[in-house]
Image (tube, rainbow, N blue to C red):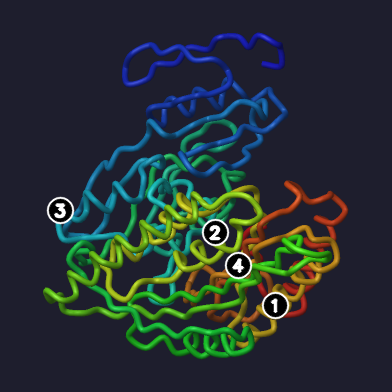
Amino acid sequence: MRASAPPVVSYALMGTPHVITSAEYLPADTADVVRTVRDSRDRSAPFTVCGGEQTEEYGLADQRAVLSLRKMNSVLDINLGRRTVRVQAGAKLSEIDRRLGAHGLGLPVVGDHRDITAGGFASVGGVSTASHRYGMFIDQIVDLEYVDPDGRIGTCGRGHHVERFHRILGAGGRAGIITALTLDVVDVDKDRTWLTTDADRFLDFDSFVEHATTEINHPGSAAMQVGRWIDTAAIKVARPVGTGQVSLGAVRFGQWSSLYPATPTRGLRARREVGTRTRKSLGAIASAAGGRAGMPVRNAAAGALMFAPKVLTMRDAEYLADTVISSSERGPAYRVGVFAPLANYGAVFYGLHDLFNRHRERTGCFTVISAMTYGVRSPYLRAEAAARGLSATDYGLITFTCRLRPSALPSDQLREIVSGIDEICRSEQALRYSV
């Protein structure tokens, strides 16, 4: 498959012969995945396994070849008695939730984008703004089916082959290709469950971290919780008259949002409609404001989009980030997530914030530095910590997203940043989620 004109490979998709190039494999079921893996065992470079939004390297075939699970997207069974749902790995969580909603059920933990798939989310662990109540997506998995590197089908779960179960979950596709999962569900009508936001806003980073620490340790009855911090670099532009430059566009602010169930009223419904229209307008502004002169406007609009409105439904709240990403994010970014033990949460937050700010001040590599955080109470994470010889505890997830300028980090600087993150994790007994 390294030739300039890749050979054609045939597969039986949906019972009908389907021809694709070696650049992409499109299995329709587990048997197709088995055939693809077995045909590719003699190749040393990795597959890229893709469930739709998520890619995971898998050591099987030419790296340019993609095994896409997007056709394996069925909801196989909804068991009302056991409160479980069986799905193929390529099924989107938003579609699974829509199907469950017809039965008054829902997934307790979903990603914040509508295109996230069950297999992709499982392979990276999966967290959400409800993780302080329900843990990680991994914690909701009852059992799973997978295909190992030798093309053999296997099953594992909470009650059988537990060690293998934990090895495959969160492994990013390296220990096996997840093809189907059984998930726990809860009784909830997400379209008719209304939430109100108790929001606190901050212009001072110290106050923001102190408040976030308190809320993560004591969430109370909050259905969801999330803190967001925005820190943009100042933009220097030439003065219109005279010499020199003027500094514009520096923005530093944050918000902690705790969302609580509310009884819907006519007033709440009207307020939700106004909030929805406002967010769409802000998204349009953030998308349209171009160039250096428009950056302060874009930063302000994008920042406002990140914060939860006063009134919304549970489904609105779960997919709030869809608006931000589709409307306001531009250009490449560096992103890292760290699970900070509650006892060391503040130290980890300050360490990461100072690390990225130091590199921005020294080299100008970042423009906007933003952080998102919430609590995670996960049996899986506690077991993972114990396996590493760390204290089993609850965590606060801290995710930093740094917009790049120029378009890429030099490799030596990237290594320095990763080394700094690893040192913070070692000294504070934190677990790196993604980098």
Front tag of 1 and 2: 2
Q: Is the N terminus in the top left, top right, bottom left or bottom right quadrant?
A: top right
Element type at mark 1? loop
Q: Earlier in the sequence, mark 2 or mark 4?
A: 2
Which of the 4 quarters of the picture holds residue 218? bottom left
Q: Position of residue 219 (x, y in %)?
A: 41, 86
Look at mark 3 in the image and give the residue it sits on: 102
Binning the other alpha carbons within 10 Å of mark 1 as few (below 14), some (14 to 19) or many (20 upward) gives many
Q: Secondary structure at mark 3?
A: loop
Q: Looking at the picture, tell me which residue is in the foreground, 190 or 56.
A: 190
Kindly state the secondary structure of the residue where label 2 is placed: helix
Mark 2 / mark 3, whichever is N-terminal: 3
* Left or right: 261 as drawn, with respect to 352: left
The residue indicated by pointer 4 is 370
Of residues 190 and 204, which is closer to you in this image?
204
First reached walking from the N terminus: tag 3 or tag 4: 3
Tell me which numbered mark, 1 or 2, is placed earlier along the sequence.
2
How far apart in space, not on screen, are marks 3 and 1 (Cα)? Answer: 43 Å
* Residue at figure coordinates x 61%, y 58% from the top left: 295
Spot occupied by residue 261 in the image (x, y as percentages of width and height): 25, 78
| Residue wearing tag 2 | 298
User: Who comes first in sequence, dot 4 or dot 1?
Assistant: 4
Residue at screen point 65% across, 48% down:
332
In the picture as drawn, the residue positioned furthest to the left comes out as 266
Q: CA distance from mark 3 to mark 4?
A: 37 Å
What residue type is disc 2 on?
Arg
- The residues tagged by marks 2 and 4 sit, at their Cα atoms, a distance apart of 14 Å
Of mark 3 and mark 1, the one earlier in the sequence is: 3
Report how far apart the C-alphas of labels 1 and 2 lie in the structure: 37 Å
What is the crowding at mark 4: few (fewer than 14 residues within 10 Å), some, or many (at least 20)? many
In the image, what residue type sits under mark 3?
Answer: Ala
Q: Which residue is mark 1?
A: 429
